[in-house]
Image (spheres, rainbow, N blue to C red):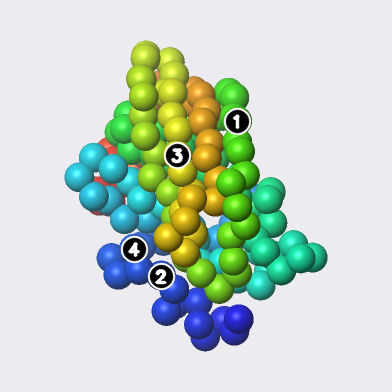
Amino acid sequence: MTDALVPTLIPSGFRPLDVSDDFVGLIGPLWFKVEGDKLRVGLPLEKRHGNPMGWAHGGLLVTVADMVMGAGSGHATGIRWPHPTVSLGTEFVRGARLGQWLEGTARIARRTLNFCFASCDLVCGGEIVLVASGVFKVPDVEKIPEALRARAMGKWGET
């Protein structure tokens, strides 16, 4: 797959997900689209995302699922600041083919003052490739640096 094909894989209405995470920057950018109270997060699968067998690397899939649920937790809480992963469980269902769009939407089963309990399915080529669940820590707004606090508040897609 050439770099020229990447833009054609990104569905209409998706925008780059602005996260200040250097590790995620190595695989991304990730893309997002808000639909009501849901946050869709995806990634065009490029050659650099592949394993030696020519499929998306399992570590990439787990990273994307973690980001889907973490960003989804931030969308649910209205705090666009890292929601650290407390626990994460995944199951690989099938391979994700390179050259296709990979996407997930977080389902927030429960939110407490301190935690979001989330799950997601990653879908590629119309098939579920990974199922995941996790617990994410809701950040203490007072600990967000004051200079960044106003920008961090609100749901994804809000300016």
The mark closer to the camera, 4 or 3, is 3
Of pointers 2 and 3, the one earlier in the residue sequence: 2
Of pointers 3 and 1, the one earlier in the residue sequence: 1
User: Identity of the amino acid at label 2?
Assistant: Ile
Residue labelled with disc 3: 120
Which residue appears at 42% of the width and 23% of the height?
116
Q: Residues under labels 1 and 4: Cα distance?
A: 27 Å
In this view of the protein, which residue sits in the foreground, 101 or 80? 101
Whether residue 52 is visible to the viewer of this picture, yes or no, is yes
Instruction: Answer whether labels 4 and 2 touch (C-beta < 8 Å).
Output: yes
- Where residue 114 appears, as percent x and y from the top left, is 43, 15
Residue labelled with disc 1: 89
The relative height of residue 123 versus residue 45 in the rendered view (above or below) is: above
The mark closer to the camera, 2 or 3, is 3
- Secondary structure type for disc 1: strand
User: Identity of the amino acid at label 4?
Assistant: Phe
User: Identity of the amino acid at label 3?
Assistant: Cys
Instruction: Answer whether labels 4 and 3 touch (C-beta < 8 Å).
Output: no
Residue labelled with disc 4: 14
Residue labelled with disc 2: 10
The relative height of residue 88 versus residue 100 in the rendered view (above or below) is: above
